[in-house]
Amino acid sequence: MKVTWSPPAIQDRLSIWFWISSENHAAAIHMESLFDAAADRLANHPELGKPGEIPGSRELVVHESYRLVYEFDPQREEVEILTLSHTHRQWPPLKR
């Protein structure tokens, strides 16, 4: 199954990279490897995450601090990672 990262998820990933690498470059590299490994697992097991708070989405905690929110389409054989969210942040975000 193909795994893609949405533009917001890519931006989340970059922000996490810059935040962590400003303090600890090795930790940022480790976090990247966790994100990559999670995406690889989803390619083979798209129902690995629990049903998400947003209808049709699923959530996979890849580290105690981060969760991947994704959708998968079995007909198109595609997983789309929608966002990377810190586990201590409100999810889904409150509407104003």
Image (cartoon, rainbow, N blue to C red):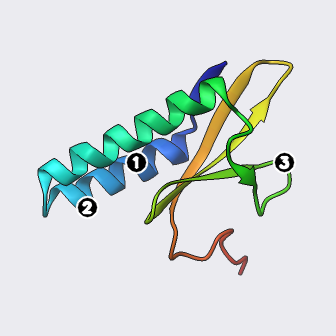
Residue 21 is labelled as none
**Circles 2 and 3: CB atoms closer than 8 Å:** no
In three-dimensional space, the C-alpha distance between marks 1 and 2, rounded to whole angstroms, equals: 10 Å
Residue in the image at 80% along x and 29% along y: 73
Per the image, the residue denoted by label 1 is 13
Rendered position, 70 above or below 52: above
Amino acid marked by disc 2: Trp
Q: Which residue is mark 3?
A: 56
Assess disc 2: are there few (<14), some (14-19) or many (≥20) residues with their C-alpha within 10 Å of its C-alpha: few
| Residue extending farthest bottom | 96
- Give x and y (percent) for residue 84: 51, 53
Amino acid type, mark 3: Gly
Residue found 84% across the figure and 48% down from its top: 56
- Along the line of sight, the residue nearer the viewer: 81 or 36: 36
| Percent coordinates x, y for residue 25 in the rendering | 13, 51
Please identify the quadrant where the C terminus is shown. Answer: bottom right
Please give the residue where the numbered disc 2 appears in the rendered image: 19
Total count of labels: 3
Q: Secondary structure at mark 3?
A: loop
**Above/below status of 75 relative to 40:** above
> Could you tell me how far apart the alpha carbons at marks 1 and 3 are, in whole angstroms?
22 Å
> Which residue is found at the position 23% from the left and 59% from the top?
20
Find residue 72 and report its horizontal and vertical position in percent: 75, 34
